Amino acid sequence: MKLAPALLRLLFAITLLLALAFLAVALARRPTPPISSTEAPPTSPSPSDEFAGQRDYLVDVYIEGAGINNPEVLEAMRSVPRHKFVPASYIDQAYEDHPLPIGYGQTISQPYIVALMTQLLDLQPGEKVLEIGTGSGYQAAVLAELEGVEVYTIEIVPELAELAATRLKELGYDNVHVRQGDGYYGWPEEAPFDAIIVTAAPDHLPAPLAEQLAEGGRLVIPIGPPGWYQTLWQFVRLPGESELTAYNMGGVSFVPFTGAGIESAPEAPVPTYLPTP
Ligand SMILES: C[S@@+](CC[C@H](N)C(=O)[O-])C[C@H]1O[C@@H](n2cnc3c(N)ncnc32)[C@H](O)[C@@H]1O
């Protein structure tokens, strides 16, 4: 019976050890607190705003996942806050891969199409690009993210031109120049351009735009009947050649190209088919 206190002490020590072990396991299994919605995921290279995770997902799945592979274009798409270019009532859809209304019967283009057209422009540092159809200013902002690129953009709807100019300025895009007017005639004072992008669909290639394309330049434009499907063309002014070479990039759907220029101009021939490069 003399052993009883020692046995009791041993039992007490074992119980204590078991309790401490249970406590350690319980603490290890405790769920980690969720990342607050205002924090970017720790691995995200995107600017830290509350939509960075959604933007990365859009780019990973619907843009890179759909074949866009130019790293600068992908980085630009990860950087531009599309939610700042859509009306407040559509913010919850800003990172879905489809166009959205921006008022005046116009739209902000589908992100994949923005990325595809940007990639087809093949912009290099120090180059000048002309955009016809500023709309919300989103495509212009994506172009402006590319290193050393100067962007000139023309919008025919005065209210949209003013809104886009203000928005781009507030977001710090000092390399974007917005003009209100009919883009059919291009921007002759700033020509030639290394690249031209048209984000509304005319039924023919406006001659002034072709004339304002520099040697070696690329012109990306949807051409086809208004209100229907059109063909996306990439025209290239190959060095030493007077005619543009055209590449058919597939079917697209854009809002119509409007204004006196397109309505009064004689229809120019459109290439019927050339294989993609
Ligand atoms: C699909 S929206 C452009 C989307 C725009 N790039 C964006 O990122 O939001 C087409 C735009 O082209 C404009 N547009 C149509 N015809 C035009 C013309 N002749 N000159 C300039 N802009 C024109 C429309 O008013 C409209 O804002």
Image (cartoon, rainbow, N blue to C red):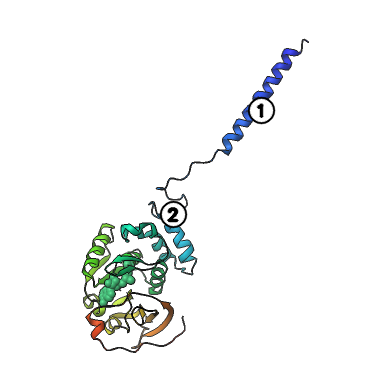
Q: Residue furthest top?
A: 2
Toward which corner of the image does residue 218 lie, by quadrant? bottom left
In the image, 218: left or right of 186? right
Q: Nearer the viewer, residue 164 or 73?
A: 164
- The answer to which of marks 2 and 1 sits earlier in the sequence is 1
Residue 19: x and y, percent?
Answer: 63, 27
Visible in this render: residue 133?
no
Residue bearing mark 1: 18
Amino acid type, callout 1: Leu
Considering only vertical position in the picture, is 270 above or below 191? below
Residue at the location (75% across, 13% down)?
Answer: 4
Residue at the location (38% across, 69% down)?
Answer: 114
Residue bearing mark 2: 53
Residue 172: x and y, percent?
Answer: 28, 58
Q: Nearer the viewer, residue 141 or 188?
A: 141
Within 8 Å of ligand 1, the CB of disc 2? no
Amino acid type, callout 2: Gly
Q: Nearer the viewer, residue 175 or 30?
A: 30
